[in-house]
Image: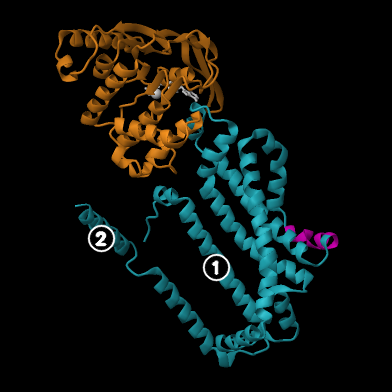
Amino acid sequence: MSEIDLIDLSKRFALKVDGKPQIVHALDGLNFTVRTGEVAALIGPSGCGKTTALRIAMGLDSASSGRVTVDGRVVKGCGYDRAMVFQHAELLPWLTALQNVMFGLELKGVRGELLRETAMQCLDLVGLKDSHQRRPYQLSGGMQQRVGIARALAVDPKILLMDEPFGALDAQTREDLQEQLLGIHARTGKTILFVTHDLDEAVLLADRVVVMQHGRLQEIVTVPLPRPRTDLAALRVTPEFATTRYRIWQALHAAAGTVH
Amino acid sequence: MAAADERLAAREQAEVAVTQHRWPRPAITLLSLAVVFGIWELCAPLINPVFGSYPSEIAMAFWQLARTGELWIALGQSLQPFVVGYGLAIAVGVPLGLVIGRFRTVEAALGIYVTAGYAMPLVALVPLLILWLGLGFWVKVAIIFLMSLFPICINTWLGVTAVPKSLIEVGKSFVATDAVILRRIVLPATLPYIMAGVRLAVGRAVVAMVVAEFFTSISGLGAIILKSANNFETANMFVPILLLVVLAVGLNSLIGFVERRVAPWQAEIAGRDRE
Ligand SMILES: Nc1ncnc2c1ncn2[C@@H]1O[C@H](COP(=O)(O)OP(=O)(O)OP(=O)(O)O)[C@@H](O)[C@H]1O
Ligand SMILES: [Mg+2]
């Protein structure tokens, strides 16, 4: 399994506002590590650079300076060691749910019976086995997002990068999927980095919570809840849950405080 | 249970269909045609047979031309180069448009020719083409090919530049090569634009076919038109003209049918919602 390091990561975007060139510092010396088999949550105010960090970690964007390494090797472009769940699902509209999940597998070179079987298993995992023949426009936003998760899981990456994977879901489905993700993690020991705006979710799922502000690391909060975490409802009422949640809230608050 | 569900689904779809077109649209179209042809026929006594004609006389002329086989031979002479030229235009125009749209260097190198070919009146080249290729089959193919190539190519090119970057990134995130991204993401995402180009080109290709036959004036439907006009057989002249109309409209709806088959998601996303 794999560890991913974001080292001194900076990203500048040049853009024009009213015809005047302007530089946006989306990332400004970001440093953190997600250890092998760890689940890390990335949290921070809107626009602080979470998606940018994830895209660079995936290899979709290049850093202006700094680097990303997986097990010590510098990342250049995308690879099957990592898979991304996008903030807005990004399914291919001309393919059915099943074909969308098969898409990544096919590119990886999986063929024949195994291809369909693996894709079906992954759809089953996110509770969409019965909708496998539908096309994206026939699925709700939450269902689309789940297909996106299945598509990423299908290629069996060592590192899973997820951009607000459960953001568009109703409370019930959200809890189901959170438990599914914990189950998948317990079984496979994948390294997982996910972005969220939900403090509860960060605490319930993650081993450590990375709090960002203005493209920099604000604080890393360690979650003392033991694994395996099976009964999420029970975890929510533990004092550890409440104190950890409060510490993250404070870190975010401090981050927000520096804005003004 | 499943059967009941299916029946329910079928009924709901039927209901949707009914509310969408209260009047079956083909019926409205046929009615409109009947009215127009009826009025035209009623005007028959006012029409000088040298300068015009009317439906019943045209029908007689059609029967004559069809019976001697002259019409069908001419139709064949027109359709063969049409199919070859138009087919070649699709086979060349789509890949060319895809590559121009996808790669900046190719766009810089070849884009100018496509733009020029689309904008210029290609009819101006016909005498030159006749010099090169003579008066036979291939000059017709060349004219039809040239006049339908550019709308197909330019539409495909436009479509490629409209493909959302995020979809291409899906391919990249699964380590797709440029060729795979082109074939499995850019091509399907561009299909609606390609079909629009193919539809636009069909009209141009029919024009090209007739223009080619006017210039070469040896064979095909165009030759019948010219010959009849020279002999003041105006009713005969209308036969190939109306046949061309039917041909063009038929090809158009054929393309519409293909469009719905190859890009069914497009109609759903675009959601045709109108009175
Ligand atoms: N392609 C781009 N061009 C210019 N600026 C960009 C681009 N992508 C991101 N930015 C800027 O970089 C900053 C960080 O954006 P990013 O999308 O990483 O934020 P985020 O933390 O994911 O926010 P959210 O929680 O709202 O998704 C923002 O100020 C944004 O405007
Ligand atoms: Mg984001």
Residue at figure coordinates x 81%, y 67% from the top left: B135
Residue B40 screen position, x and y as percent: 53, 84
The quarter of the image holding the C terminus of chain A is top left
Please state if A251 lies on the left or on the right of B235 as rendered.
left
Residue under numbered circle 2: B11
- Under circle 1, the secondary element is helix
> Residue at left 46%, top 80%?
B34
Chain ID, cyan in image: B
Dot 2 beta carbon under 8 Å from ligand 1 = no
The magenta segment: B122-132
Question: Mark 2, chain letter?
Answer: B
Up-down: is B109 above or below A258? Answer: below
Q: Quadrant of ligand 1?
A: top left
Q: Is residue A181 magenta?
A: no
First along the sequence among labels 1 and 2: 2
Whether residue B205 sits left or right of residue B253 in the image: it is right
> Of A87 and A111, which appears nearest the observer?
A111
Q: Point out the image quarter for the N terminus of chain A.
A: top left
Colour scheme = by chain
Q: Is residue A91 visible?
A: no
Which chain does the residue under circle 1 lie in? B
Q: Colour of chain A?
A: orange
Q: Identify the amino acid type marked 2.
A: Arg
Which SS does the magenta portion mostly show?
A: helix
Q: Is residue A142 at all visible to an observer of this figure?
A: yes
Question: Badge 1 is on which residue?
Answer: B249
> Percent position (x, y) of residue B256?
50, 59
Q: Which residue sits furthest bottom?
A: B45
Type of amino acid under label 1: Val
**Which of these two is toward me, A196 or B68?**
B68
Q: Position of residue A192 (x, y in %)?
A: 37, 17
Measured in 3D between alpha carbons, the distance from the residue under mark 1 to the one under mark 2, in whole angstroms, is 33 Å
